[in-house]
Amino acid sequence: MRAMGRTLKILLSLAAPFAVFGAMIGVDRAFGAPGRHDGFVQRLELPPAAREVGLPPIQGPYDASRPLVVIDAGHGGHDPGAGEGALEEKRLTLTLAQALRDKLLEEGGVRVALTRDSDRYLLLEERSGIARRLNADLFISIHADSAERAEANGASIYTLSERGTSETAARYAERENRADRINGVLLKGQEDAVSAILVDLSQRDSQGQASTFAKLLIREGDGHLRFRSQPLQSASLAVLKVPDMPSVLIETGYLSNAGDAGWLASDEGRDAFAEVTARAVRFYFARQSSR
């Protein structure tokens, strides 16, 4: 009996903490704040799934056979780019893009779309992605430069570099997993190496066409636009990495240079840019139609 009593005492001492804990839970459920016992899982609101950016309207002739130019005003929204105040790059590029659009529409025969027609932010891949989804025939991204040296001045036109071409071909083929088309050729079912070669060939052709347009712009702008001493440049710029669409980036001048900034912000500078670029666009498409 004495041994049984000792065992009972031990069991009671072990059970006591659990009884206390159970009583605490009961009291909390009975008198605690509403909702405290609605499960022990923390619920978090997850952001909605990312959606593909909407496509802008296409202006100009209703004839889908007419060439389409997509004009991209660099920066926007929380990204002002170079410059400051009224001469922020995002404001200047939008003004120039709208002026070029209006000039092309005024002369007719060309369809036009702007990646942005307001002060909104777009990712680099969204900008070129809009042009590709619209099946654009030419993509023009407009920017303005800045430099520590105040004497730096003049416009330049960038096309994709050879290194950027090969890097993009391999990356694009891998990313799309052979499920897309390049210049009408279905990549699905192709070997990785074959897909990369097809993308590379397509992009090199587009790069050659972009270079043709850039040279036409320099030719037409001679004596009308302010160019750097070596205006034709190439770089591995993300916004130009589109496999099957001629793409150029125009640095219209240096906002850090008082002469460039004043000219670009003036009616004269804006009109000259729009007129010269529109003329180069028309000559470019005239050449393409004769190929």
Image: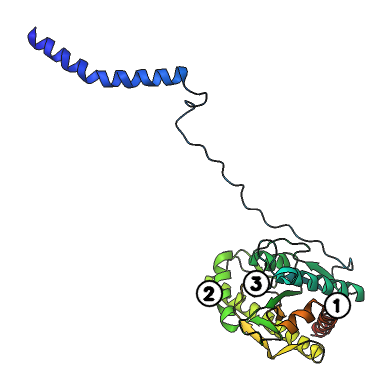
Residue 118 in picture, x, y percent from top left? 77, 62
Looking at the image, is mark 2 or mark 1 nearer the viewer?
Answer: 1
- The amino acid marked with disc number 2 is Ala
Quarter-of-image position of residue 194: bottom right
Looking at the image, is mark 3 or mark 1 nearer the viewer?
Answer: 1
- Does 153 appear above or below 2? below
In this view, the residue farthest toward the top is 1
Residue 239 is tagged as: 3
Label 1, residues with CA under 10 Å away: few <14, some 14-19, many ≥20: few
Secondary structure beneath label 1: helix
Q: Which residue is mark 1?
A: 267
Label 3, residues with CA under 10 Å away: few <14, some 14-19, many ≥20: many
Residue 193 is tagged as: 2
- Does 215 appear above or below 126? below
- The amino acid marked with disc number 3 is Val
Quarter-of-image position of residue 45: top right
Q: Is residue 55 left or right of residue 15?
A: right
For the N terminus, the quadrant is top left
- Does 147 appear above or below 21? below
- Does 125 appear above or below 247? above
Q: Residue at x 75, y 69 (%)?
A: 86
